[in-house]
Image (tube, rainbow, N blue to C red):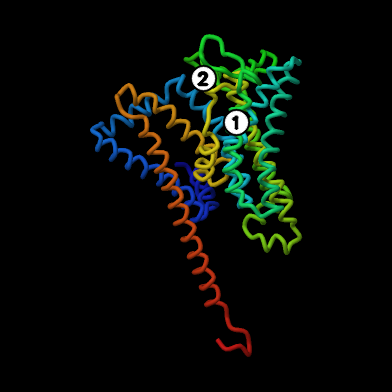
């Protein structure tokens, strides 16, 4: 290594605190631990652990698998961002699942019913999805600020209501039509003017990456700017860390709770858009479900940071895609679910240990400073 490269490395390492290094090591350690647990389970069921994991990795790096991973990561990322907005405010928005499904259903129905020029058509569909997601989340926000109802309870109930309402709307007598060539039913197909073309950025396959992956990236950048570079983001983080301190500094906590829930729901409304506008073009009975709960796990894995969430979304999508090879080897794909669950649990434990270490280190630092500070004149040492 040259002297110039050595100086750059020294500067880079000098900017990273021990606590920061621990925060980076924690998720990596959790992933390695999850892989070891998975290998033990594979050994117990009679499958070759190393060969199975190698096969999963080789399958996931095929061109088509890479595209599928990027596509899944696109909506996983949006889901995790929606959850992270609530987490920053110390709110647990479990209702992302119901919010995005109801938003996708409504947006699909509107998109299939109108005819507009391409940009306006896509914009209208996305606007409707954002509006429905925000409106559905606002119910939980109002219940919390007006009646003190826990957002955990209200969003769980709203998920159930959204599921029932979606089933009622997705009926041949209302919004649904028969899907050609199958026994499935769905909303009227969105015409070409409302579809977002895919991106052929991976060679070796005809499958394309969702065009709305660009929207997902833009939302991550916007999330970072709003949370870390605006007064609103500062008030949101301050309220999440200490509500009494935020009140003392003049923050309207009830307003922040309501606005945070609305923003979380608005982002949740986007979760179904990559699939709807890039592949399905209709909301049918087989539209992806459960993405909201996946977003919770990814937000925890990424510590609510847009870059960390991106890595978490890619990891989750990678594992989901690599599960496709397991059935060919006569191994249950539920192994992937076990690995994902162990990762989440391990990450939570690792982050808690890092937090305790940071608190103890800070206490030791303060104690050393107090011990080295000379006593003022007239004050007993």
Foreground residue, 374 or 83? 83
Element under label 2? Answer: loop
Q: Residue at left 51%, top 12%?
A: 182
Sequence-first disc among 2 and 1: 1
Q: Quadrant of residue 200?
A: top right
Quarter occupied by the C terminus: bottom right
Instruction: Work out whether residue 277 can be spotted.
Output: yes
Horizontal side, residue 335 vs residue 27: left or right:
left
Cβ atoms at labels 2 and 1 below 8 Å apart: no
Question: As rendered, which of 371 and 72 lies closer to the eye?
Answer: 72
Task: Please state the horizontal and vertical placement of residue 81, each as a whole percent of the image.
Answer: 60, 39
Quarter of the image where the N terminus is located: top left
Percent position of residue 287, x then y: 55, 24
Query: Disc 2 to disc 1, how far (Cα)?
Result: 29 Å
Q: Residue furthest top?
A: 181
Among all residues in the image, which is located at the extreme front? 173
In the rendered image, the vertical position of residue 87 relative to residue 200, given as above or below: below
- Residue highlighted by disc 1: 101
Q: Which residue is mark 2?
A: 202
- Closer to the eye: label 2 or 1: 1
Q: Mark 1, residues whose alpha carbon is within 10 Å: few (<14), some, or many (≥20)? A: many
Q: Is residue 73 above or below residue 152?
A: above
Element on which disc 1 rests: helix
What residue appears at the point 50 percent right and 56 percent down from the top-left corner? 19
> Looking at the picture, how far across and down is residue 137, in whole percent?
66, 41
């Amino acid at each position: 290594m040259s002297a110039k490269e050595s100086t750059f490395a020294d500067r880079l390492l000098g900017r990273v605190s021990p606590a920061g290094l621990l925060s980076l090591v924690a998720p990596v350690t959790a992933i390695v631990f999850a892989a070891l647990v998975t290998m033990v389970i594979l050994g117990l069921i009679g499958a070759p652990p190393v060969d199975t994991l190698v096969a999963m990795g080789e399958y996931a790096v095929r061109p088509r698998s890479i595209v599928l991973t990027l596509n899944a990561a696109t909506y996983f990322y949006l889901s995790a961002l929606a959850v992270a907005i609530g987490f920053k405010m110390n709110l647990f928005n479990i209702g992302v699942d119901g919010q995005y499904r109801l938003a996708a259903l409504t947006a699909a129905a509107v998109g299939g019913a109108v005819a507009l020029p391409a940009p306006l058509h896509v914009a209208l569909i996305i606007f409707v999805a954002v509006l429905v997601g925000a409106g559905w989340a606002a119910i939980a926000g109002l219940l919390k600020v007006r009646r003190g109802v826990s957002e955990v309870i209200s969003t769980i109930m709203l998920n159930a209501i959204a599921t029932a309402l979606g089933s009622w709307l997705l009926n041949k007598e209302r919004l649904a039509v028969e899907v050609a060539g199958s026994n499935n039913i769905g909303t009227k197909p969105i015409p070409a003017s409302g579809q977002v073309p895919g991106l052929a950025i991976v060679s070796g396959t005809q499958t394309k990456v969702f065009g709305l992956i660009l929207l997902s990236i833009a939302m991550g950048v916007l999330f970072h700017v709003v949370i870390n570079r605006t007064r609103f983001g500062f008030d949101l983080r301050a309220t999440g860390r200490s509500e009494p301190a935020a009140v003392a500094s003049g923050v309207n906590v009830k307003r922040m709770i309501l606005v945070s829930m609305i923003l979380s729901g608005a982002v949740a409304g986007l979760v179904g858009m990559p699939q709807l506008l890039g592949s399905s073009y209709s909301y049918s009975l087989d539209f992806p479900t459960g993405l909201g709960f996946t977003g919770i796990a990814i937000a925890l894995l990424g510590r609510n940071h847009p870059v960390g969430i991106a890595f978490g979304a890619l990891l989750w999508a990678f594992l989901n895609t690599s599960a496709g090879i397991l059935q060919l080897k006569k191994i249950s794909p539920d192994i992937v679910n076990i690995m994902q669950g162990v990762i989440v649990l391990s990450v939570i434990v690792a982050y808690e240990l890092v937090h305790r270490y940071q608190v103890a280190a800070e206490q030791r630092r303060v104690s050393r400073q107090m011990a080295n500070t000379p006593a003022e004149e007239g004050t007993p040492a």
